[in-house]
Image (spheres, rainbow, N blue to C red):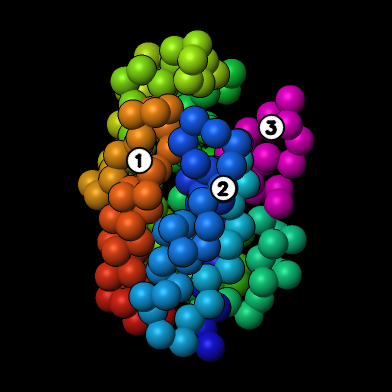
Amino acid sequence: MKNILAFGDSNTWGLIPGTKERYPDEIRWTGLVQNKLNDTKIIEEGLCGRTTVFEDEIRPFRKGVDTLPLILESASPLDGVIIMLGTNDCKTYYNANSHIIGKGLERCIEEIEKYVSPEKVLVVSPIHLGDEVWKPTKDPEFDVDSVNRSKELADTYRRIAEKRGNTFLAASSYASPSKRDDEHLDESGHEALATAITRKIEAMHI
């Protein structure tokens, strides 16, 4: 049995758009990937609000780089790691541009590469935020700049992955957020992302 860690935020946890509820295993992209791959266990480590390196003063333990060492040690031995973070880093509170968010991602990758080789790390840039995500009825922790910043992450992450010898996939090339909240994957989004990630994992020969 091969073990692959999926480290991410609410779109890895499987938040149902517009709610605080969670999709079941058979809907979440992590569960779908596990079903599509033979002899593979996907270790789910999704947490709503998780960032790469930023501390959320309202919700503790969201700083990914701080929790990664414990999670990696607990989950080891690992055959591969999928990391998909960056959406929450786009919040106005952190005031971070795509370059800084990329630096945060690299700090996380440095921790991951203590457990698996670079070519076994799948860097996934997140889906884009929807154009109206910042509205009071959706998620006012974001603004218009956040939307634009989310659209810059794919190029930033691609360059980082190429430089480090990681594998790269842009989730935004396959899925978009639900119109319900302009932030989270709906069922079709989870399915599309799962198909893309499965193909990538197979090509990586993990």
Label 1: element kind = loop
Binning the other alpha carbons within 10 Å of mark 3 as few (below 14), some (14 to 19) or many (20 upward) gives some
Between discs 3 and 2, the one toward the N terminus? 2
Q: Nearer the viewer, residue 47 or 76?
A: 47
| Residue in view at x 39 percent, y 28 percent | 180
Chain part drawn in magenta: 49-67
Where is residue 109 drawn, in percent x and y?
Answer: 52, 56
The residue mark sitting in front, 2 or 1, is 2
Q: Nearer the viewer, residue 177 or 171?
A: 177
The residue to which callout 1 is attached is 127
Q: Is residue 189 magenta?
A: no
The residue mark sitting in front, 1 or 3, is 1
Between discs 1 and 3, the one toward the N terminus? 3
**Three-letter code, disc 3:** Glu
| C-alpha separation, residue under disc 1 versus residue under disc 3 | 22 Å
Please give the label number shown on residue 55: 3
Please give the label number shown on residue 22: 2
Q: Is residue 53 magenta?
A: yes
Dot 1 and dot 3 residues touching (CB under 8 Å): no
| Residue in view at x 40 percent, y 43 percent | 185
The residue mark sitting in front, 3 or 2, is 2
Occupied quadrant, residue 58? top right
Between discs 2 and 1, the one toward the N terminus? 2
Binning the other alpha carbons within 10 Å of mark 1 as few (below 14), some (14 to 19) or many (20 upward) gives many
What main secondary structure does the magenta stretch of the protein show? Answer: loop
**Three-letter code, disc 2:** Arg
Q: Is residue 26 left or right of residue 141?
A: left
| C-alpha separation, residue under disc 2 versus residue under disc 1 | 18 Å
